[in-house]
Amino acid sequence: MTKGSPSKKRRVHFDPDNVDIVVEQGDNLLQTAIAAGVHINASCGGSGVCGTCKVLIENGTVDSSRTEKLSEEEYELGLRQACQSSIITDLMVHLPVESRLEPAILTRERKELAAGRQQLEALATGWRFAPPLSKLFIELPPPTLDDNASDLSRVLRGLKQQYNLDNISVDFSVVKKLAKVLRDGDWKVTVTTLLNGSETRWDGKRGQTIINIEPGDTRGKHYSLVFDIGTTAVRGQLLDLNRGKALAQSVDYNGQISYGEDVITRIAYCQKPGGLKKLQRVVIATINGIIKQLLAQAGVEVRHIGHIVVAGNTTMLQLLLGLEPKYIRLTPYTPVANFIPQVRANYLGIELGEHVYLHSLPSVASYVGADIVSGILGAGVYQRKKLTLYIDIGTNGEIVIGNSDWMVTASCSAGPAFEGGGVKYGMIATYGAIEGFDINPSNFEPVIGTIGEVKPKGICGSGLINIIAGLLEAGVIGQNGKFNTDLPTKRIRQGSDGYEYVLCWSPETQIGKDIVITEVDIDNLIRAKAAMYAGCQTLIKSVALTCSSLEQVIIAGAFGSNIDIEKAITIGLLPDLPRDKFIFIGNGSLLGARLTSFSTDMLDDGGRVARMMTNFELSENTAFMNNYIAALFLPHTNADEFPSVNKRLAKPKKSKLKK
Amino acid sequence: MTKGSPSKKRRVHFDPDNVDIVVEQGDNLLQTAIAAGVHINASCGGSGVCGTCKVLIENGTVDSSRTEKLSEEEYELGLRQACQSSIITDLMVHLPVESRLEPAILTRERKELAAGRQQLEALATGWRFAPPLSKLFIELPPPTLDDNASDLSRVLRGLKQQYNLDNISVDFSVVKKLAKVLRDGDWKVTVTTLLNGSETRWDGKRGQTIINIEPGDTRGKHYSLVFDIGTTAVRGQLLDLNRGKALAQSVDYNGQISYGEDVITRIAYCQKPGGLKKLQRVVIATINGIIKQLLAQAGVEVRHIGHIVVAGNTTMLQLLLGLEPKYIRLTPYTPVANFIPQVRANYLGIELGEHVYLHSLPSVASYVGADIVSGILGAGVYQRKKLTLYIDIGTNGEIVIGNSDWMVTASCSAGPAFEGGGVKYGMIATYGAIEGFDINPSNFEPVIGTIGEVKPKGICGSGLINIIAGLLEAGVIGQNGKFNTDLPTKRIRQGSDGYEYVLCWSPETQIGKDIVITEVDIDNLIRAKAAMYAGCQTLIKSVALTCSSLEQVIIAGAFGSNIDIEKAITIGLLPDLPRDKFIFIGNGSLLGARLTSFSTDMLDDGGRVARMMTNFELSENTAFMNNYIAALFLPHTNADEFPSVNKRLAKPKKSKLKK
């Protein structure tokens, strides 16, 4: 088909995915890629401002003028912003490496998680193994003319006689299949019950609901699922509820990533007609994909999955559940519900049996979500007297300080720097991202390490911390984050955004360009770390303590798992405490969800934790603003806050390669 | 289109309905009529054995051989059994009057209901007006940065503060619309709550569930529905829950009647593939039609309906709910459930808001259903010491004997005689049915009255009772039900089924044939009344009492409402007690459902009544068989059982016209 043909149908081919799709002339190229299942990074959700969705038009014509996100040279080469391009003719489109996602990287896990995965579950103590989901086998006498009670009465009688169960309710769906199942099983059946009262709050006596009935004895097949719905990635595990262990785990990018990288962009997308429904469908599709992988890995049939527990930040849960997220973003930042009633999984489109209910862990506020509650629960913070800082670093960093008596929490809007946003060569932590960094203090030459040990294509958040800490220790930048332009190295130079330091020369990169870090990048990171640290300070001062009183620091989250504690302290992101007080727990959200599935005690404690936590809104808080301004320095304007760092900065430099 | 055309499409026109439908050649004519929405009586559900579905083929050809249900003369005229006919060509089909239903007749109501409709609700006493469905108006403070609790927490807090409501759960569907409704209503909203614990049984403390939320103050619009799902007719009322009264009522034939007249035929139909689904859809369509009428009558919008309560016999409820009815029909006659968990009305296909739950009154056994429980509830039988017989006469007649201390119940399979089945010119109680009957004892000439005062076309059940009582009192038949063939009247003659009495000569009828009553008909009625009376006797003897100890007889049901007490006692159907002990309550099922909607006390009492009732299975009960055989006489072999009747039968006859 040639340009100008009267037909409106256009075929678009995407490489390297090798996918074709036929669409209408005039369709948006980014939307076309999404429709074809081809992921293009589009941090801003397709509004044209981030410039991450660059594609190469190898053949054909799009309607797309040059924006400031494309250099003249790039435009000449055929690069376009997909979100700003309308399809005119048939196309051959190539996705440059920096516009693509690498799924494999999601499985990267810190080696030295808190004393190993086994012991992670020992952080929270004192819980009985007693899942809220139970399977009970009953043998019933068949009906006779002298005893022709209804099928349901017979089942309830059996549960009373054999398990002393009373005050039990029954899902209508169970009644629907009851007659057949009882007779198919020759009056020997397995009943699945789910504890009531996980809805909103519950102060009364606990009942149970019969949610399923199967012929014969199926107690041996007793499984459930847990999910952490992250803004970037969705992680799931399949649990064996007889043995209390995870049989399989899997992870994938949250399909919503094509609609924007952070929660704010996603909420904005929901304001378009059908936007919320679409984002809900997309994350459900991600979940369904993960479920398929989990079932295959564990060799379990879908009908034996009886429960699903989810955690995630407030926005992610609201999108999953189809709840209007608009007011999360608008002051005064109200979520629809912190305690979400259980809902049938298949009502949401999750491909599980009709009997499966989805339990959401409770949240505290719009920006302190169920993922944090779940982490606090899983890490047992609420169980001990030990004064703990729990921190999950990200675009929105969440902080909890407290112990078994009290807990305060806040969310800090750190900006996207930790996830590679707002940084010239920033990228998410995937293959080719520079993470390891050291510098020779004599000639200021860097030694870099990338994720996957491939040629670099950018800098991820943890890399940024390492680079800035290294540059600071080597005296390449000062404590104000500005370059020392007097140093004898051509790596420090004037670029289009002011001074910059060249990390890699173009021939060594995947992208054919020098990868640099600019003063603007450094400034962005300083703002991000200042927000996190000021959050901690504000919270701890609110309870009339100081950072030095902290007895434990728990670092949760994918980003936190990959930072270097020493470097993070050096730049003033984490408080300057003895290093053995820091514990990494990885995905705290999944940890708590798992314990919730294993133990009714923990399920109840989840509610208790959410209600214990007092949320501080920092956005219009004067103390926070003062703390923030004081933290806009490396490591901090107040030298007393970081004694060990300031001591080291005063020492002569020596080189040591990390990572 | 002419016969033999290669096309397979055939157009069928039905008169007098004046309906056309295009179907495939070879399709069954009865099914075609159903598909076209044309009702043809088909008592046996289309299996060919009842002969009630005769139609006249005015034009065109069907493939249908003559059966024993069609005389040669009828076959010559073009009459065919619709259920036995395949469509060959385009057709013009005329439905004879006796194959049609007259909807208007369903609204016929006994004039002298227990002291009038107003006082009906006073039969049950001591209940508070406190519907299980409540509407609560709350005014909430809008969120601020200092108080940015979630929308749901705000609502729950409001309910706690303004109504001291606690321990409340929330439907997920409410959470879904919460954000919008709160803001649309400017933080003034009306919450609809439904009392929990109507599922199966409930012994603990009562909670409530928020099932709906609306912007503004909608307390003034607070309505619910009640339905009695009868085998023949479905009756509904729309209730105002603020004023505690019915605003509208409506009735229609149960659409399932086209698939068989009695519960057994319907259950048999469910064994066909898709049969249960089909019958469920059909009765739901009937309900939806009635709902439309009720809303229009009352001028109420469907969104203001908040609850629906249904009663009916066990089979009708199971079909409504899509529950396998097979085991109702097979020994030992087990229903799926006596206490049915509430279910969303729109899950069943009932066209009401998403928030509306359907509450089914509980039943006792396969043949003592929620309609009986509802009647006992509504009539307050369980509240008084007075020893009561509650009787609902029909194909399956249900009997309850007891008082506030105990209740026994049984169902008697009386056969179809009371509904016009198994009777040569039997028909259901609609226009043209002979109901009134008297006889001149001097010349044995009858005086008949028909429903609607039109020309007769058959005999309904109540007519049959009146006719047999009249013939007995006039000495036309003996106490054994046999004709006195010595009498000087040509109305007694030998027919194809043995001796018969001519009620109307053909010119006076709508059907162009003599309408007669035969010895076989009389024998069928004697068996039916014997079953009912033997049931009463068996129950009362089981508690070591006699019929003479009864202090009250409550007659419920459409059929019962139209019988003549004196005549019913004369033939030995009802016990020979002082006539002022008999009370008619009409549709007891609807009465109890209404009280259940008005009062949580009554809702709870419904469960108590169902559990109080001890069911006797009569089908293999020796005492019942003996009582039955003893009752196969007019009025009874034991003259002491019917002293007043036997006294009267001994007197000389005189004429008096009853209708």
Image (cartoon, coloured by chain):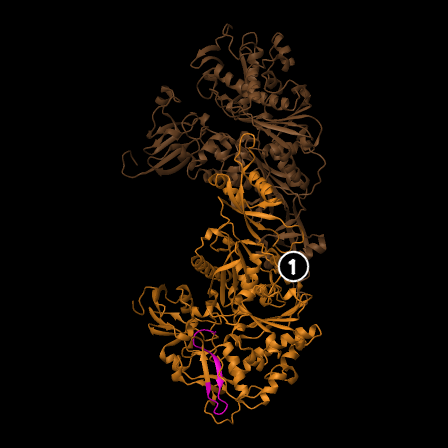
Chain colours: A orange, B brown
Residue A108 image offset from top left, x and y in percent:
47, 70
**Residue that mark 1 sits on:** B153
Image side of residue B413 versus residue B566, left or right: left
As rendered, which of B653 and A423 lies closer to the eye? A423
Q: Is residue A432 magenta?
A: yes
Above or below, B51 against B301 in this view is above
Find residue B148 and report its horizontal and vertical position in percent.
65, 65
**Up/down of A333 relative to A212, above or below:** below
**Callout 1: residue from which chain?**
B
Specify the quadrant of the image occupied by residue A368: bottom right
What residue is shown at x 69% (from left), y 61% (from top)? B141
Could one spot residue A121 in this view of the protein?
Answer: yes
Residue nearer the viewer, A556 or B288 = A556
Crowding at mark 1 (Cα within 10 Å: few <14, some 14-19, many 20+): some
Element at label 1 = helix
Q: Which region is colored magenta?
A: A428-446
Q: Position of residue A24 (x, y in %)?
A: 37, 64
Q: Is residue A17 left or right of residue A461?
A: left
Q: Is residue B631 magenta?
A: no
Towards the viewer: A273 or A461: A461
Is there any visible trace of residue B517 in the rendered image? Answer: no
Placement of the N terminus of chain A among the 4 image quadrants: bottom left
Location of residue B544 (image quadrant): top right
Residue placed most toward the observer, A106 or B95: A106
Q: Position of residue A410 (x, y in %)?
A: 63, 70
Which residue type does callout 1 highlight?
A: Ser
B534 in relation to A379, above or below: above
Q: Residue visible at 27% across and 34% down? A: B4
Specify the quadrant of the image occupied by residue A71: bottom left
B405 relative position to A110: left or right: right
